[in-house]
Structures are given as structure tokens and as C-alpha cells.
Amino acid sequence: MQIQVRINEEGALRNQRYAFTDRFTLVSELLQNARRAGATHIEVDYDAGTQILVVQDNGGGLDDFQKLLSFHESGWDDATSAEERPFGVGFSKCLYAATRCIVASRHQRVDIDTGAALTKAAIDVESIAEEVTGTRIELHGVDLLDLGNRIETLCLGFPVEVLFNGKPLTRRFAAAHLTTMASPIGTVHLTGMQDGKFSYNALVFLQGFCVMKPNYGSFDEVNVVHLDSRQFMARLPDRDKLIDEDVQSKRISAALTACWRQILESAKARLSPEQFVAIYYAAMRAWGHWDLLNDLDVLPVELFDEIVDYPIQDDDRSYVRQVAVAPTRQAVESGAVTLVSLEWLGDDNAARWMLARAKGYLIFDWIGLSSEHWAWRHVRFLDQETVQVEAVSEQIRVQLEGRWIWPTVILCDSVILRSAKDVAEITDAGVCHEDVLYIPAGETSGESVRQASSFIDENDQFLASDLDADRDALADLIRRLRSVDPVQTLDSLLQELRLGRYPLLHGKAFQITIGVGTVPGYSVALVTSEGTCHAES
């Protein structure tokens, strides 16, 4: 017994109706056929009331009407077949989408009842006196209600002039309307070629129709690729996606990267180093061409931040600001400017940030340069250095009983930060180090709790009220411990006790004595007409 592949023609004709996923594919297939026939002008007219679609082109016309009804036989000449690899199913969409198809070309015409045609009934080709230039296709009973809104998008990259209901379509991404360059995969337009304002987004067209587009973002600034149809194929039958899209997208990305290399090398040759870096650094970095900076003395301003405010645990990093002017090579190499690498401020590197702030170091984004760039030799990786913290003239240490944090608080005259290479003295701001808040004489705000914590919980919620409470608690603690008026200090403490909750104490007089030392004892005496009653601790 032997078996072989067989095709149920009736089943194939019946099921082909469901092959196309988009009813507007009908229009794109007719436009594609007109382009392949050499058309330079195509007119599309659609009347939603009568549901009649007419497509007229000025191409080479149709010499064999049997090609219309021969499925999976492209009917194109050898050159077109080799160039574009047509599938031979395009016109079949007309049979499923319309009730009647009238096709005229030169002095011939065919009027097709689509229902009869799909039962393989014979259709007469008749001669006509009128000479039809190119091909005119008239379809009846076609439901394309939204065609007016869709056809502009459909033809964004189509190479042939198209009129819809008498109005020319803009086709703004057609290759003829763009500044393009040749590449191994086809024709490429790069946004940002002149001003460096690059985009990662790309619209990719094959034979004039979009096969890849960005998942998000507008089309205002986008790269455009018109693929070489000899190398790429689109999915049958809608032609809306590339075959092996995951593999082909990598080829396209690599080609865009190579095109940017050409643009950047050309710009580097014609511009001054200052202009080249200012205009094109972002594009160099985005497309992986950092090495073009290696032989230049000029550095991109985007790589440098100065510390302009008190460093805190904050994702916005509002305490740093990009410098207005990048340091010169001479300033970096002479040591006049110190470049440091620092991770964002967290639980363990606040002292390093405070050292960098005190010394005026510039925070340097070394990742933005090639590892062979000369600036790498002058970068200090401060996260890898040990910084010691010392309280000068420590006065007292207590624990802050906050709502969210409970650090040890040390009050002192100043704070010394010491690394193997530098020493800095801090007098105006708190320093958090190893769960200790060092508070020098000039700090009263309580802001240093923001070095101790980000005040973000396990659900990534920012605890604003806890931050406010802990900041106020620290500020109040500092004020009390530094107070020189004992009455004001005691009054401040008593205000927090909410004594109204204790009726037993109302109207009573007390004598309080506080001991000395870091953990002083105290005694409390109730003063009555008979004398005093003592309690001690």
C-alpha cells in the first residue's frame, strides 16, 4: 500500500476564505499587483453606500485573464518572481470579499460572479471597444466601511502614488520622501542623522507595506527601513509580519547599528570635536559606538553630575545636577578635578557621598565611555574605598525612638570623614554611618533621617507621614539635647506626655532632680502641705 499527498480542491477553495485575518488585505493586495505591473499611479475609489470598490492603475495591463483565477500560480515574469517571490493568492481575496468582480484591461473584460467562480464555473472573457490603460478592477458588495481612515496608514511606505477618492495620500515614509542610505538589508532612513536626536523605534516595510512597527510611541521620530525583498519574506497571506521575525529583527537592528557607525564617522570627520560630542554623544552611547571618543580630548557633559544638595535615599536624586560645562582633559589629568564613581545613596554609602560633597568631587558615569578611554585612568571608585567616621568632641549618644527608624544619635561638634586619600570635616549636616546618625553642631533640621532610610515599605509605598514624624522627632531630640535652658527643656518633654490623660496628677506639685553622666538617674518628690514624698530611679 502506498500513500501520497492529495488536495481536496473543494475544501481548499472553501477554507481559503478564512486564511486572511484582515479584510483590508484586499486593498493592499490590489495595490501590490498594480505596483508589480509597473504602475506609477493608482486610483482607489470606494463608495460605502453602494459598497463598490474600484482600483485603477496605469501599469502594463493584463494579457492573460486566467492568471486571476489560478491559485498559487503567481503569473508574474521570471524577473518579478525572483525579485519579490509572490505567492499567487492575492486576487483570491477578491473572490471571498466581493459578490461580483469586473476586471478590464486593454480591450478585454471579465465579469465574475464570485460564487460561481468558487464552484469552478467557466467565466467568459469578452472583448470591449474601450481601451483600458493598465488594469481596472471593480468589486461589488465589499464591506470596507472604515477604509477612509485606514488607507492612509496602509500606504505610509508605499512607493507608488495613490489617490483615494480623488485625494492623493501623503505616503510620508515612502523611500522617495526620505533621506536614505543603502545597507546590506535594504534602504534605511535614520532619525537624528543631522541633529543626533536618535530613536530606537523603527518602521520596517517590505514591498511597500509595514511588517514591523514599535509597540509604543508616535511615528514622529522613527527610523524607517525598506527591506530588500530578495532577502526577506512576509507571512502568507496577509504579509503583515516577517517570517522568522525574531531572527530578522536582529539582522535589522545590526544593520541600523552599522548605519549609525557610518553617520557618526562622517560627522566626526567634518565637525570640531566639541560639536561632534555635543550633537552626537547620546547617539554614540545608544548605538554602542563609544570608542569614537577614545582619541578626543573633549568629554560629554552628560557624564558628570555635581552634588548640589544634601544627599538622601531618594530615587529622584535631586541632590545632584548635571554640570554646565564638562571638565577639560588637562583638569582631569592634573587632579584639579576628581572624578568618582558612586552607587546611588543607600544604607551603606552615605559617608562616601558626604565625603564627595565636602571635597567637591564630580560624580562620573564611567559606563558611558569605552573601557579604553583615557578618562578611565583617572576615576576613583569610591564605593570600593573604606571611609571612617569620627565624632569630634562627642557630647551625648542616645537612641531615636522613631516611628519607622531607631538609629543611635551622636551629638558632637563636628564629624571627620577619613579615607585612605582624603580627610573632610563636616559641621553643617548629619552623617549616617552603620545605623548611627552623627549630628554636628550646625545641624538642627532632622533631615539626616533620610540618609538612614528611604521610607519605602515592602510594597514600594512611600511612607510620607512616617518620614515627617521621624524627621520632626530627630529635630526635637537635637533641640532638647542642645538646649541651654533647663526649664524650656523640661517643658518640651512634658508637652509630649499628654498629662491630661492622668487625673491622679492633676493639681499636684513635684520636685524633680536629674543626675549627671550619659545615663543619669533621677528622683521625683511629691510636694504636699505635710512635706515631700520621694521616689527615685
Image: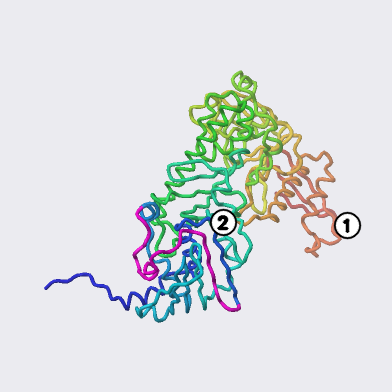
Residue 54 among magenta residues: yes
Residue 336 place in picture, x, y as percent: 65, 21
- In the structure shown, which secondary structural element does the residue marked by tag 1 occupy? loop
- In the shown orientation, is residue 243 left or right of residue 438? left
Quadrant of the image occupied by residue 286 = top right
**Name of the residue lying farthest toward the left:** 1
What label sits on residue 529 in the rendered view?
1
Q: Amino acid at mark 2?
A: Glu
Question: Mark 2 touching mark 1, by CB under 8 A?
Answer: no
Residue 518: x, y in percent?
69, 39
* Residue that mark 2 sits on: 161
Among the 4 quarters of the image, the one containing residue 306: top right
Q: Position of residue 338 (x, y in %)?
A: 62, 25
Residue nearest the observer in this picture, 497 or 85: 85
Decide: few, some or many residues near mark 2? Use Cα within 10 Å; few <14, some 14-19, many ≥20: some
Residue range of the region highlighted in magenta in the rendering? 49-78
Q: How is the image coloured?
A: rainbow
Residue at image point 59% right, 35% down: 280
What crowding class fits label 1: few (fewer than 14 Cα within 10 Å), some (14-19), or many (20 or more)? few
Q: Is residue 36 left or right of residue 404?
A: left
Whichever of callouts 2 and 1 sits on the residue coming sooner in the sequence is: 2
- Tell me if I can see residue 90 in this picture: yes
Q: Amino acid at mark 1?
A: Ser
Q: Nearer the viewer, residue 379 or 269?
A: 269
| Label 2 SS | strand
Please name which of the two marks, 2 or 1, marks the residue nearer to the observer: 2
The majority secondary structure of the magenta stretch comes to: loop
The residue depicted at 46 percent of the width and 42 percent of the height is 255
Residue 300, horizontal then vertical, whole percent: 61, 31
Q: Could you say which disc has been placed on residue 108 in the image?
A: none
